Image (cartoon, rainbow, N blue to C red):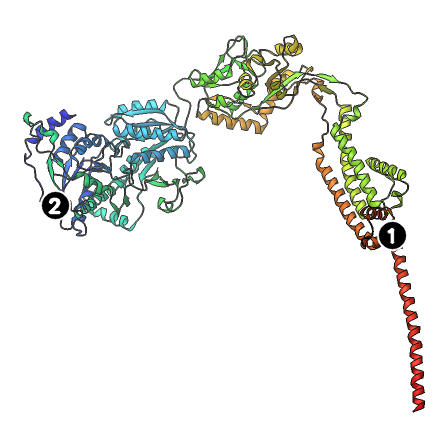
């Protein structure tokens, strides 16, 4: 590269002055040189030239920017935007003491001359070189004044994910711009579990024949979602060739980058012939929010471009607006640069001075000494331009990157939504969402309906089977046991069985044909490993796998499975024997603890009712022996609701009501359990389930080739030495009959689907314990295979219309032996099933006793015997008071109340007699006094 520079500089030095120009160090210069490096003979170049010149004129006429300093523009034609010539053209600009260059037009050229810009410290401002690898770290003097392609590729990845496609084909120009953009797209797709399945590069100057050859390969691929990333020069030509090849028909999806929207905007208005090749195509356009300044510039554009295009007008694209804002941003940066007291000076590059002896005359190229300061001022620009807020983030990109999603329809376009780095896809303008928190959830992603290629609004599936003559190789396990599920027809390449019928029925429901062929996997002597079969899909040996393949965590990490078409968890099978009924079978329904607690509550309730009824009810009175018999009789007679004693107290009735409800539940449960024990055949087994197998040391059998072995070792912790592989049901039967003492196994662990077939004709075995896993069988496909999704939908349809059950009955429904209706263990009723009832009853008894005690204490203090008075005066001892209280409690309530009443009447009679005696004495005294008064009067 240095050699190329030296040769070019030697050529340039003949026509350029060898003396450097140093600007006046004491005053602000009258003008500042800026360069524009574009291909002005292209439509984009013409638009850029017009926009830049308009912006320079506006800046020079605005005294608020740069004061009396004017911008002087040097236009340099980038003829073919090739690397070598672009270097020469860039050096011609830099030799004129240019402080900044607007351009270049392409990312390829930008990669080349950015090295020169770094060396000479001249800022390079470009709005069309959007290659994401042109980072500010590698090229600090390359400043992008539009949006990086990293955001455009993120928007495309979000589009692909929104429409639930998983694979795309990338067609692109084989240059820095194309390769790096597609590389960024691949990264963004991978973040969404999508991928580029086929890359179709083209030379930037490909002929129509070369484009045809590439697109023919694309048409043979599986994916129908095509992303086209190229330039306006030959991008429309690709779409024209695709139209001629029938690749714009129903089923195809075309997503293009901003080149197409630029081509459409510049060429507006377009004829129907021009847009006929791109009907239904989706393209992106850099979003510029609507504003008064934007409307002013758009209305002004027609006056600026009149007569500058062959058709009389030149359309305005977003690049023209960014070109205008780029000049203004540079002017603001220069204004801040001068206000900081900086000056523009140039000096010789000491690295080039050593070549003077070679007579290369490199003095014309000088370093812009204050270039780094100007670069910093450009990144600090904060203005509102025609494109909206113009401000840089810390990573050197413009704020608020956003795109319009455009759908080509008829002779125009229709906006179907927006994409922004803030909220993703939406139908609301991005500026309306910036004030809200970011929301990238799938529910918030929205677009308007799309008009797809082929004049349809139905979303394309996005893929087809590749039209290259290759059929899907579907691996099928060659089983030696349980051949009802899958087996190969003897002497043919055909397979049959439950799994095969489910697959064929599901394939027949697909809206497209699936070319496939079954390939057997296994030696036919032993059951093959389904895990290894799944691994061969990832290795590319098989395109899919169909059979009795259990969906496990390990396998889902390698492939994608369809919806399960049968549930099949692991169960334990063991030998069982019949249990005959005995004379004590009536005790079996309850556990010993249940019997004990029930008996205690019978006695407890009887005692509580006796206490509550003793003072009121004659049925609960009498000699102590009779009362004990009454308690026992009343307690146990409630079991049959045959108690003859009536309860008269409110509390007694309350307790009895609760207890009779408890007795009703207990009687019903006992009757049901005893009926089951006496009428249903009972089986017993020393193995109770998977827990007993884990705790024992006895051998355990499993089906060879299944995932059961790995699960028992890794998940259940069973030692590998205890596991015995069994190939066929016959081997399993012999091993279970022998038992562990004779070289057999204590139990056999397998999936329920197999066990149902196994037990249908073997009545000496049964499932013990509960199913301890929840698995299902599915068909395996490579990761992100769209066929797995479509087949899952078909399997659900089979389940809904009943076909799946009919297939199951055809292959797996068989008459079970009579013992399959037997019970393995006696389901004894335990206390934990009734403790709630007993708790309620106990609380009712305690509450009734507390209320009864309070009532009795009140009656005792109110109607107690004469000893109560002596107790109150403190003359009686504690034992005496207790005996008195107990005597009162034992006494019938009517007697206590009668005694209290008699006592009260006696007190009333005594008070009446005392009052009469006092009255007689009073009368006698009164009579004597009256006589005395009369005698006195007589004397007077």
- What residue would you read off at disc 1? 896
Question: Where residue 90 sits in the image (x, y, percent)?
Answer: 15, 33
Question: Where residue 29 sits in the image (x, y, percent)?
Answer: 11, 46
**Quadrant assignment, res 936:** bottom right
Q: Is residue 546 left or right of residue 582?
A: left
Question: Where residue 138 sits in the image (x, y, percent)?
Answer: 24, 31
Indicate the quadrant containing the N terminus: top left, top right, bottom left or bottom right: top left
Indicate the quadrant containing the C terminus: top left, top right, bottom left or bottom right: bottom right
- Crowd rating for badge 1 (residues with CA inside 10 Å; few <14, some 14–19, many 20+): some
Q: Is residue 930 left or right of residue 47?
A: right
In terms of depth relative to the viewer, which is nearer, 556 or 271? Answer: 556
Secondary structure at numbered mark 2: strand
Q: Return the disc, 2 or 1, that comes first in the chain's sequence.
A: 2
Question: Where residue 73 sits in the image (x, y, percent)?
Answer: 14, 42
**Quadrant assignment, res 247:** top left
Camera-near label (2 vs 1) is 1
User: In this rendering, does residue 66 appear at all?
Assistant: yes
Q: Tell me how far mark 2 sits from mark 1, CA to CA.
A: 127 Å
Disc number at residue 421? none
- What residue would you read off at disc 2? 31
Secondary structure at numbered mark 1: helix
The relative height of residue 234 versus residue 688 in the rendered view (above or below) is: below
The relative height of residue 583 versus residue 854 in the rendered view (above or below) is: above
In terms of depth relative to the viewer, which is nearer, 363 or 587? Answer: 587
User: Which residue is rendered at x = 73% and y = 42% of the image?
Assistant: 843
**Quadrant assignment, res 119:** top left
């Amino acid at each position: 590269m240095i050699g190329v520079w030296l040769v070019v500089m030697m050529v340039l030095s003949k026509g350029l002055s060898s003396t450097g120009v140093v600007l006046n160090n004491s005053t602000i210069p009258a003008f500042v040189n800026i360069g524009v490096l574009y291909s002005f003979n292209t439509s984009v170049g013409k638009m850029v030239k017009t926009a830049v010149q308009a912006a320079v004129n506006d800046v020079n006429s605005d005294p608020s920017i740069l004061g009396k300093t004017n911008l002087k523009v040097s236009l340099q034609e980038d003829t073919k935007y090739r690397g070598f010539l672009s270097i020469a053209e860039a050096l011609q600009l830099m030799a004129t003491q240019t402080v900044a260059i607007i351009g270049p037009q392409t990312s390829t050229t930008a990669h080349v001359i950015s090295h020169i810009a770094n060396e000479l410290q001249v800022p390079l401002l470009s709005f069309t070189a959007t290659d994401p690898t042109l980072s500010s770290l590698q090229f600090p003097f390359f400043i992008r004044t539009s949006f990086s392609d990293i955001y455009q590729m993120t928007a495309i990845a979000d589009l692909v994910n929104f429409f639930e496609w998983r694979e795309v084909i990338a067609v692109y120009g084989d240059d820095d711009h194309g390769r790096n953009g597609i590389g960024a797209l691949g990264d963004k797709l991978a973040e969404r579990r999508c991928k580029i399945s086929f890359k179709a590069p083209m030379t930037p100057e490909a002929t129509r024949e070369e484009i045809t050859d590439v697109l023919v390969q694309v048409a043979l691929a599986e994916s129908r979602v095509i992303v086209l990333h190229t330039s306006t020069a030959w991008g429309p030509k690709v779409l024209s060739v695709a139209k001629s090849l029938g690749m714009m028909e129903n089923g195809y999806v075309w997503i293009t980058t901003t080149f197409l929207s630029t081509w459409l905007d510049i060429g507006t208005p377009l004829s129907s012939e021009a847009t006929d090749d791109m009907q239904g195509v989706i393209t992106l356009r850099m979003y510029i929010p609507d504003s008064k300044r934007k409307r002013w510039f758009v209305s002004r554009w027609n006056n600026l471009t009149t007569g500058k295009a062959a058709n009389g007008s030149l359309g305005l694209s977003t690049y023209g607006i960014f070109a205008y804002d780029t000049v203004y941003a540079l002017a603001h940066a220069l204004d801040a640069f001068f206000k900081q007291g900086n000056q523009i000076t140039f000096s010789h590059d000491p690295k080039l001075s050593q070549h003077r002896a070679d007579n290369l005359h490199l003095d014309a190229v000088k370093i812009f000494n204050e270039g780094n300061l100007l670069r910093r001022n450009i990144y600090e620009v904060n203005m509102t331009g025609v494109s909206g807020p113009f401000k840089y983030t810390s990573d050197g990109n413009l704020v608020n990157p956003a795109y319009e999603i455009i759908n080509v329809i008829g002779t125009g376009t229709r906006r179907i939504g927006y994409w922004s780095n803030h909220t993703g896809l939406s139908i609301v303008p991005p500026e309306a969402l910036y004030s809200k928190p970011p929301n990238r959830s799938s529910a918030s992603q929205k677009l308007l309906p799309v008009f797809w290629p082929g004049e349809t609004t139905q979303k394309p599936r996005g893929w087809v089977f590749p039209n290259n003559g290759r059929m899907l190789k579907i691996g099928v396990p060659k089983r030696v046991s349980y051949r009802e599920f899958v087996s190969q027809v003897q002497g043919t390449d055909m397979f049959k069985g439950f799994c095969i019928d489910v697959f064929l029925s599901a394939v027949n429901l697909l809206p497209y044909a699936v070319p496939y062929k079954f390939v057997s996997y296994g030696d036919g002597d032993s059951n093959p490993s389904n895990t290894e079969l799944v691994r061969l899909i990832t290795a590319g040996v098989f395109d899919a796998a169909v059979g009795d393949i259990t969906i496990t965590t390990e396998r889902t990490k390698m492939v994608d499975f369809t919806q399960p078409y049968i549930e099949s968890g692991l169960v334990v099978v063991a030998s069982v024997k019949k249990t005959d009924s005995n004379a004590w079978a009536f005790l079996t329904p309850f556990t010993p603890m249940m019997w004990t607690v029930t008996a205690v509550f019978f006695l407890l309730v009887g005692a509580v009712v006796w206490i509550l009824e003793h003072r009121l009810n004659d049925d609960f009175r009498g000699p102590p022996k009779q009362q004990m018999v009454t308690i026992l009789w009343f307690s146990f007679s409630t079991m049959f609701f045959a108690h003859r004693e009536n309860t008269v107290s409110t509390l007694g009735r309350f307790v009895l009501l609760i207890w009779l409800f408890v007795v009703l539940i207990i009687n019903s449960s006992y009757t049901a359990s005893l009926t089951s024990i006496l009428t249903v055949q009972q089986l017993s087994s020393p193995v109770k389930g998977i827990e007993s197998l884990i705790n024992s040391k006895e051998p355990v059998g499993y089906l060879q080739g299944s995932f059961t072995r790995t699960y028992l070792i890794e998940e259940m912790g069973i030692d590998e030495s205890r596991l015995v592989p069994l190939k066929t049901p016959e081997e399993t039967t012999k091993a279970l009959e022998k038992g562990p003492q004779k070289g057999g196994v204590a139990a056999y662990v397998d999936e329920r689907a197999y066990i149902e077939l196994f037990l249908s004709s073997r009545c000496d075995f049964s499932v013990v314990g509960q199913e301890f896993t929840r698995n299902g069988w599915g068909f395996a496909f490579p990761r992100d295979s769209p066929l797995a999704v479509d087949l899952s939908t078909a399997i659900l349809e089979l389940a809904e219309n009943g076909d799946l059950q009919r297939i199951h009955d055809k292959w797996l429904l068989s008459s079970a032996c009579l013992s399959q209706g037997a019970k393995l263990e006696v389901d004894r009723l335990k206390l934990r099933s009734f403790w709630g009832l007993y708790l309620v009853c106990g609380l009712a008894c305690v509450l009734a006793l507390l209320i009864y005690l309070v009532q009795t204490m009140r009656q005792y203090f109110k109607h107690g015997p004469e000893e109560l008075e002596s107790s109150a005066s403190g003359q009686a001892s504690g034992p005496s008071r207790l005996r008195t209280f107990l005597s009162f409690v034992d006494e019938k309530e009517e007697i206590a109340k009668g005694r209290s009443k008699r006592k009260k009447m006696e007190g009333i009679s005594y008070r009446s007699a005392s009052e009469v005696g006092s009255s007689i004495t009073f009368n006698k005294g009164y009579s004597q006094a009256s006589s005395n008064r009369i005698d006195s009067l007589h004397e007077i």
